[in-house]
Image (cartoon, rainbow, N blue to C red):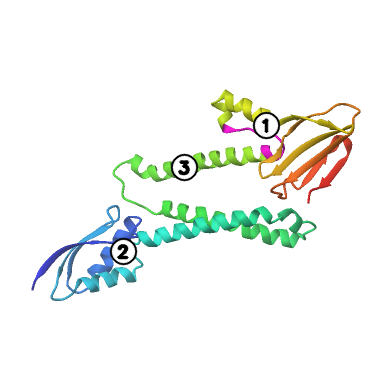
């Protein structure tokens, strides 16, 4: 009989329940005398009789439970690259995809199905997080037990606030109001941005001509000065047309023109 002590790296353990599961499974392996799992350090320490079992058998038992004994960082990197590539491709496709025209005159059933699919991200994003928080864990004090909830909700509030500011800024830009975050910290940039979004018409052959650009940032310039009782001609360069900026609307003169 030859007892042997060894430390093995085990990846994908996330909580104390993972520790208990591995310890229970390995203690049922003939020859294993003692097992101590530590998910924080991603390792297990065990004592076993190498005449009755081998490291290969122990690792195989761990793998059957869904955990890895080989470093999976390379797979995580590949997964992250795939996600980044997918986001990039979707953003490129989104610029040419007009959701407004696709859902025009859509039936209630189609809208319901679209709503079902778009709600799946909530289950995928929040479901796993809330499930992991509901699992019991051993804590030394009250703060340690509340720490996961505090960090989760703090991160959620901060991330939603930042995303809300970004998307709100883009929404204002599409409506013709450009607010640059740099403008709050630099008076120079504020004056520069303002000058870019303000223009005066140039008169050509008795007609006031204004050149504008339409892209994902909205319309530039967004503030126009014209003379009263003089015809006005708008020349709009549609660099990037989306469902939000592909129609120019002038309510005061009852004009609505779709850009092509």
Instruction: Mark 1 or mark 2: name the one nearer the start of the chain.
Output: 2
- Rendered view: 33 above or below 115: below
Q: Residue furthest top?
A: 187
Q: Which residues are magenta?
A: 172-181
* Residue that carries the numbered disc 3 in the rendered image: 155
Quadrant of the image for the N terminus? Answer: bottom left
Numbered badge on residue 196: 1
**Residue 182, position in %: x, y?**
56, 31
Q: Position of residue 140 (x, y in %)?
A: 28, 44
**Which callout, 3 or 2, points to the residue nearer the camera?**
3
Label 1 or label 2, whichever lies nearer to me, is 1
* SS category of the residue bearing label 1: helix
Pick out the residue farthest to the front: 205
Image point (54%, 26%), residue name: 185
Tell me the chief SS of the magenta region. Answer: loop
Left or right: 225, with 80 as reference point: right
User: Which one is in front in this view, the residue at disc 1 or the one at disc 3?
Assistant: 1
Pick the residue in front: 159 or 61: 159
Graded by Cα atoms within 10 Å as few (under 14), some (14 to 19) or many (20 or more), the crowding at tag 1 reads few
Q: Position of residue 240 (x, y in %)?
A: 69, 48
Task: Quote the CA–CA distance across marks 3 and 2.
Answer: 30 Å
Q: Which mark is residue 21?
A: 2
At which x and y percent is residue 222?
A: 73, 34
Cα distance in 3D space between marks 1 and 2 = 63 Å
Residue under the point 40% across and 45% down: 148
From the viewer's side, name the closer residue of 55 and 220. Answer: 220
Q: Is residue 135 magenta?
A: no
Q: Which mark is residue 226?
A: none
Q: Measuring 31% from the left and 62% from the top, which residue is drawn there?
A: 71
Horizontal arrangement in the rendering, residue 129 relative to residue 90 (left or right): left
């Amino acid at each position: 009989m030859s007892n042997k002590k060894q430390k093995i790296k085990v990846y994908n353990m996330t909580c104390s329940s993972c520790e208990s599961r591995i310890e229970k499974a390995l203690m049922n392996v003939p020859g294993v005398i003692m097992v101590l799992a530590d998910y924080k350090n991603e390792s297990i320490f065990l004592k076993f009789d190498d005449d009755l079992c081998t490291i290969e058998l122990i690792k195989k038992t761990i793998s059957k439970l869904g955990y890895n004994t080989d470093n999976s960082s390379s797979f995580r990197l590949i997964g992250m690259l795939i996600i980044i590539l997918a986001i990039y491709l979707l953003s490129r496709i989104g610029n040419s995809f007009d959701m407004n025209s696709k859902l025009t005159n859509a039936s209630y059933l189609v809208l319901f199905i679209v709503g079902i699919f778009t709600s799946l991200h909530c289950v995928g994003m929040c479901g796993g997080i809330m499930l992991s928080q509901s699992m019991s864990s051993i804590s030394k004090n009250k703060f340690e037990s509340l720490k996961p909830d505090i960090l989760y909700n703090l991160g959620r509030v901060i991330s939603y606030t930042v995303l809300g500011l970004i998307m709100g800024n883009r929404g204002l830009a599409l409506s013709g109001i450009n607010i640059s975050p740099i403008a709050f910290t630099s008076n120079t940039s504020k004056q520069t941005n303002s000058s870019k979004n303000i223009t005066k018409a140039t008169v050509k052959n008795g007609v006031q001509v204004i050149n504008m650009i339409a892209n994902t940032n909205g319309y530039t310039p967004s503030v126009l000065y014209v003379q009263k009782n003089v015809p006005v001609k708008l020349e709009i360069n549609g660099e990037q047309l989306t469902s939000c900026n592909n129609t120019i609307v002038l309510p005061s003169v009852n004009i609505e023109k779709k850009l092509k």
